[in-house]
Image (spheres, rainbow, N blue to C red):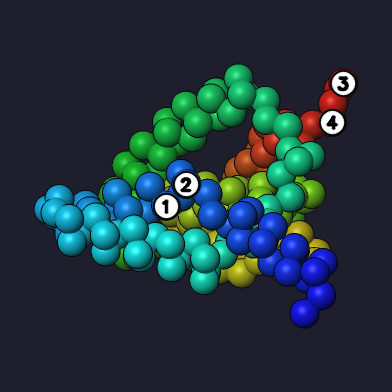
Amino acid sequence: MSNSHIGRRIDGARNRLHPSFVVWITLLWLLLMGEISVANVVGGLAVALAIVLFLPLPAMPVTETHISWGKLVLHQVVWVVELLQASVKVAWLALRPEAPPKTAILAVPMRVESELVLSYAVLLYNLQPGGSVTDIDIANRMLTIHVLDAPNEDAIEREIAAVATLERRMIEIFERKRGV
């Protein structure tokens, strides 16, 4: 093995071994075990080290990500309000004395540049009751979504507009260029 290859391996291990990850995983282990003991702390450290060394996360290209913190906080507040509204709507759909709602499967664009931002947008959409992403076409930046309540074209257009609004918010929060 060449010295440069060994050097890369050491750098790779150094990049993987973040003390904060080890501490966090150890704390989660202790919570899972429900008791603080020497054996649980040692076991938690062993599990944490095994996870960070043998199951490394891929490097995320976040160097070009610029977060607009004010817009992110505002978005999260709006998102929580929308979550409450969607929860009430889905609860009503479940409890009303009518036939189950008509559903739809739609293909909608999500033209964010970063895969990290795309995954965050999908997470936010999936957490809202009433719809879920069933497929992601990363190459074409298209989401296939299942909509719980799509009785007519207006409802479908509202859902497509909601995804477009989410897309716009993600771009404004995470993908605006410096100086813009």
Q: Is residue 153 visible?
A: no
Query: Spatial distance from mark 2 to mark 3, Cα to Cα?
Result: 35 Å
Q: Confirm or deny contact between disc 1 and disc 3 (CB under 8 A).
A: no
Q: Nearer the viewer's eye, disc 1 or disc 3?
A: 1
Q: Is residue 106 left or right of residue 35?
A: right
x, y percentage for residue 116? 66, 51
Res 179 label: 3
Give the quarter of the figure containing the N terminus: bottom right
Res 177 label: 4
Q: Amino acid at mark 3?
A: Gly
Q: Is residue 162 left or right of residue 37?
A: right
x, y percentage for residue 85? 39, 37
Q: Amino acid at mark 4?
A: Lys
Image point (82%, 67%), residue name: 4
Earlier-in-chain disc, 4 versus 1: 1
Q: Amino acid at mark 2?
A: Pro
Q: Choose between 93 and 83: the one closer to the eye.
A: 83
Image point (26%, 60%), residue name: 42
Q: Confirm or deny contact between disc 1 and disc 2 (CB under 8 A).
A: yes
Query: Spatial distance from mark 1 to mark 3, Cα to Cα?
Result: 37 Å
Q: Amino acid at mark 1?
A: Val
In the rendered image, which quarter is residue 50 located in?
bottom left
Res 142 label: none
Residue tagged 2? 19
Res 22 label: 1
Residue at the far right: name it.
179
x, y percentage for residue 27? 29, 49
Q: Confirm or deny contact between disc 4 and disc 3 (CB under 8 A).
A: yes
